[in-house]
Amino acid sequence: MAAGITGLLIFLYLFFMYQRAITQVNDGINALESNMLAIFNDNELIADAAGVRYQQLKSNNLCGNLSDFRPRNRDEWGINADRSVLNPGYGTLISRTQSEEARCMFAAGEFVRARMNTLNPGHYDTHRYIVAHDAHWFYWFTSKDSVRFSFDSSQMARNPAAFFQIPESFYDRLLLKDSRKKARSSTNFYTDKITGEKAYSLVSYIYDLSAGQVSNHIVGYLLYDFSKPELQRALRESFKNNVPSELMLKFVNRQDASHLCLTDNCNWPTVYQVYDLSDRYEFRYALPLYLYILHDPMASTAVLLAPLLFLLLFFVIRRRLNKGDNRFYSDALTGSYTRNILELIQKHELRYTTVLLFDCNKFKAINDAWGHSVGDRALKIIAQCMLDNVRAVHDLVIRTGGDEFVILLASASKEDARYIAERIAMQVTQHAFTVEGEVVPLSVSWGMSTSADNLDSAIQQADADMYRMKKGEQQESGR
């Protein structure tokens, strides 16, 4: 019973604690998804702003002078692109040629960057850049991100079609409310040139709106890079810097099954939950119960305290059961056992060498003459004489009826048993029992059986022996 209660309590505690942890994990993943979608929506707004400003500058010949370009490497031109003297107050443009289109995008990008810094101080996102539709030029909002770039080493510059999908029309994308469908324009995983980490990029389109008709023509792609460190930073922020150490979290490209492990452990269990981020990417996460118990202090403490709880319950339950046994097996009046103990003795096949049976003489006359309360006092005195004369721990005094008692002796010889019986009878007779100043004589008759293999038959033999004793006493008194 103690083991069952302990197991149930620990199970219920761990169950509710684990469910609470699962809820906290789900809330953290929801927050992470919301943050990433917020970044994507910001990217869409920035792309629209850059596109509108690009068209304004280009149509009004306000892009600036091509003389602002400076040679950078062989076949590379740039604005604020000299690695040794980068100005962090401006973005950086690198182009294959001194292109008017590139110069216009630099001017548009600088306008948008300055406005973002002014309107949203402290919330300016790094690692955001614009790539021309044919990868002819690159513009970085943060100049230091351009340091490692070169057209020769950039896979995106050599083969943009491997990274970008064909864009839908401007109005379809603008009016589509489902950000998850918009975000399918994200790239596959690639090795980021800036961080050297595996990464993917959110992609928004900067549309060419110079023509009169609806078109999907674009000027370039606006990218926001999510490398593994960036995703882990977003994860920590979503969990308020309290990411469960037992959490397993993968960021998975469902198209090719490639993934990033964002937690310390990604030895993946067979059961996990899936959270869709977009048509291309999803989170797969799990919080294995065994890891939760190992790492969560409260859960592991509960498991460690389970043996102590078991022992406490064991002793409490045993004490309560013992009290119940005492009430069931103990006679409240005399302090001896009740006849219920005989069933327990027979069930466990306990052996006793001798059975003594006692009967109170003329007990009914005492009850009739003086009342049951006096009779109860007499029974207490007789029972106490018996209890005082049993020797071993396993010797039992049992009240089998109203004024009938049985004594079971565990290891007494026939002579010892007879001596005990005679001493009890003598002490009962010698006890000065007075009622209202009048002495009321007490006496008992007894019988003995030394054949205790079968308890019922032994009691019957002792009863027959007592009957012979009573008959003998009656004959002697009649002479």
Image (cartoon, helix red, strand yellow):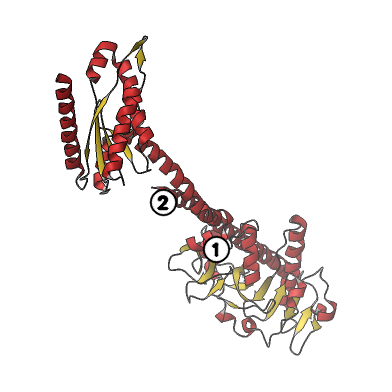
SS for callout 2: helix
Residue sitting at x 38%, y 33%:
388
Q: Is residue 276 visible?
A: no
Residue occupying image coordinates x 24% and y 45%? 346
Q: Is residue 204 visible?
A: yes
What amino acid is found at the position of numbered circle 2 in the picture? Ala
Residue drawn at the location 23% of the way across and 19% of the way down: 362
Image quarter in which the C terminus is found: top left
Residue where numbered disc 1 is placed: 247
Q: Is residue 9 left or right of 135 when viewed as pictured?
A: left
| Label 2: how many Cα within 10 Å (few below 14, some 14–19, many 20+) | some
Name the residue tied to disc 2. 3
Q: Are marks 1 and 2 in contact (CB under 8 Å)?
A: no
Q: Nearer the viewer, residue 384 or 415?
A: 415
The picture places residue 16, in percent across and down from the top left corner, at: 48, 50
Q: Nearer the viewer, mark 1 or mark 2?
A: 2
Image position of 436 (left or right of 178):
left
Task: Using the rendered view, name the quadrant where residue 93 is placed.
Answer: bottom right
- Residue 87: x percent and y percent? 83, 72
